[in-house]
Image: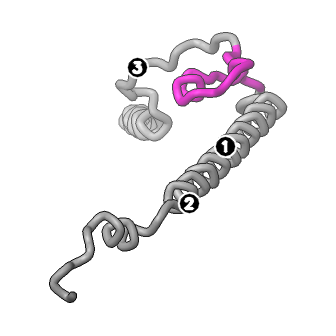
Amino acid sequence: MVLVVEIVIVAAVVFAVAALAVGRFDRLTPAPPDSASVGLPADTVTAGDVTHLRFAMALRGYRMAEVDAVLLRLAEELAWRDEELARRDDELVRLATFARIGPEPAAAERSATPPNKSQD
């Protein structure tokens, strides 16, 4: 009889350790149920669009084709924005260069001040 009690106690301890290791007694809130996939909009992608992005679940994770399509789209958006920023930087440099084409400040000051007549 003592052997049976010892086996039950050992089995209970092993179950408790296994349940703690697996997370059976975890107090986290349950994960939300899987919902329909939410992709990126057809127009410009914003940070909020990426935050609300959801992928459909497959047997071992997310559907790879869906994730690959989103990553490709984000890469295209980033490339376009990089090109646009580079174009705007070039335009700003061109405008700054154009603004400096006028007379030099020292020459403008010399022409604005009357010549000194004490040298006569």
Q: Closer to the camera: disc 1 or disc 2?
A: 2
Q: Quadrant of residue 7?
A: top left
- Which circle's residue, 1 or 2, is located before the other in the chain? 1
Question: Is residue 40 one of those drawn in magenta?
Answer: yes
Query: Could you tell me what secondary structure mostly forms the magenta stretch?
Result: loop
Say if 104 sits above or below 52 in the image: below
Callout 1: helix, strand or loop? helix
Q: Is residue 44 left or right of residue 14?
A: right
Q: Earlier in the sequence, mark 2 or mark 3?
A: 3
Q: CA distance from mark 1 to mark 3?
A: 44 Å
Mark number for residue 29?
3
Q: Give the residue type at disc 1.
A: Glu
Front label number (1 vs 3): 1
Q: Position of residue 49 (x, y in %)?
A: 58, 23
Q: Is residue 11 visible?
A: yes
For the residue carrying disc 3, how many other residues have a C-alpha within 10 Å: few (<14), some (14-19), or many (20+)?
Answer: few
Q: Are marks 1 and 3 in contact (CB under 8 Å)?
A: no
Q: Position of residue 12 (x, y in %)?
A: 41, 32
Q: Which residues are magenta?
A: 37-58
Asked whether 2 or 31 is in front, the reply is: 31
Instruction: Report the Cα–Cα distance between label 1 and label 2.
Output: 20 Å
State the mark number for residue 84: 1
Q: Residues within 10 Å of mark 1 (few under 14, many from 20)?
A: few
As drawn, the label of residue 97 is 2
- Return the residue nearer the eye: 39 or 35: 39
Position in image of residue 59 (x %, y %): 77, 27
